[in-house]
Image (cartoon, rainbow, N blue to C red):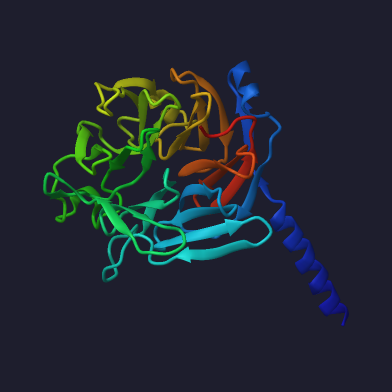
Amino acid sequence: MKHQLAFFLLLCSFSLWSQNKTIGKVTHFDPACANLIDAQAGIEVIADGFEWSEGPVWVKNGGFLLFSDVPKNTIHKWKPGEGLSVFLNPSGYTGKLPYGDEPGSNGLLINLKGELVTCEHGDRRIAAMPLQLGGKRTLADNYQGLRLNSPNDITQHPNGDYYFTDPPYGMPQKEKSPLRETTWFGVYHIDKAGKVSLVDKTLDRPNGIAVSPDGKTLYVGQSSGSQPYITAFPIAANGKTGKGKVIFDGSKTMKEGKYGIFDGMKVDKHGNIFAAGMNGILILSPEGKPLGQIETGQFTANCGWGDEDGGTLYITSDMYLCKVRTKTGGW
């Protein structure tokens, strides 16, 4: 009986510790960062055990978070007070497995209609689906008849247009895959009529993507060791983009093991960039000046704001789903 009681108390204490586990720290590089997040803010682990967590998106009409586990071909749901459950499986590949090591959905988005938009590696498309009833519809799966590689991340302009990235990470053998139909890894635009056009074909590994609150700038991050850049493209009134300009070069900081190799990103309501990558989330001004970092201590895939007031930043960091309170929020 004593052994059983001791085991029960140990189990309870472990459960309590798990619910309050925190990792990393917040570091300010510039005084302006204090207006965005406290240096003492705790990065709380709210779920773990995932193979590679990605694409956190808050569903305001429901009060829950959705995020991908890409290798597991699954979208999970996390709701305060209820915890974790499977929302969708398969999430990004409906064919015969195995298909590469990252077949599932990656980046997620709740569009202006309230639908869930998914970047699907294995099915090589961007799809949209209602959260309640009805199946998926394809928004894009090719450019001029050439199949996409493995759409990675997506953002929506205030006018309803989409922009997305298409690196090779979800393909079998990745860039060496015999299934490739394009010779580049592109950034694309989907207009309101559904037409797909090419924004850029020169980036080495386009990955994270976000639009500024005023709709005038498109930001693209690269998960590339040779080009760890964040590039800004001007957006015209018709949704077309101009020539890109590198606003942050992470080559030096990447070699120092600090930050670089950028994955997903979000832009807050003030236009600041929250770029996931090495060691956590790098916070940049709209012009690309480093302001601070949310350091998770490991490679971090993506982030997104949520909760009723929009002030909590949810972070997918390798095996973890985390959250941290901020003084800002998404636009």
Count of picture labels:
0
What residue occupies the far right of the structure in this picture? 2
What residue occupies the far left of the structure in this picture? 145
Q: Is residue 87 left or right of residue 160?
A: right
Q: Is residue 147 left or right of residue 214?
A: left
Which image quadrant for residue 98? bottom left
Q: Position of residue 149 (x, y in %)?
A: 22, 49
Q: Nearer the viewer, residue 35 or 270?
A: 270
270 relative to 303, above or below: above
Judge whether residue 134 can be spotted in this image: yes
Q: Nearer the viewer, residue 1 or 248?
A: 248
251 relative to 135, above or below: above
Q: Position of residue 294 (x, y in %)?
A: 58, 34
Q: Nearer the viewer, residue 145 or 133?
A: 133
Judge whether residue 300 can be spotted in this image: no
Q: Position of residue 46 (x, y in %)?
A: 63, 53
Q: Residue at x 33, y 21 (%)?
A: 246
Q: Quadrant of the N terminus?
A: bottom right
Q: Is residue 180 left or right of residue 330?
A: left
Q: Residue at x 69, y 35 (%)?
A: 41
Q: Residue at x 32, y 37 (%)?
A: 161
Q: Nearer the viewer, residue 187 or 307?
A: 307
What residue occupies the far bottom of the structure in this picture? 1
Which image quadrant for residue 111? top left
Q: Position of residue 286 (x, y in %)?
A: 46, 20
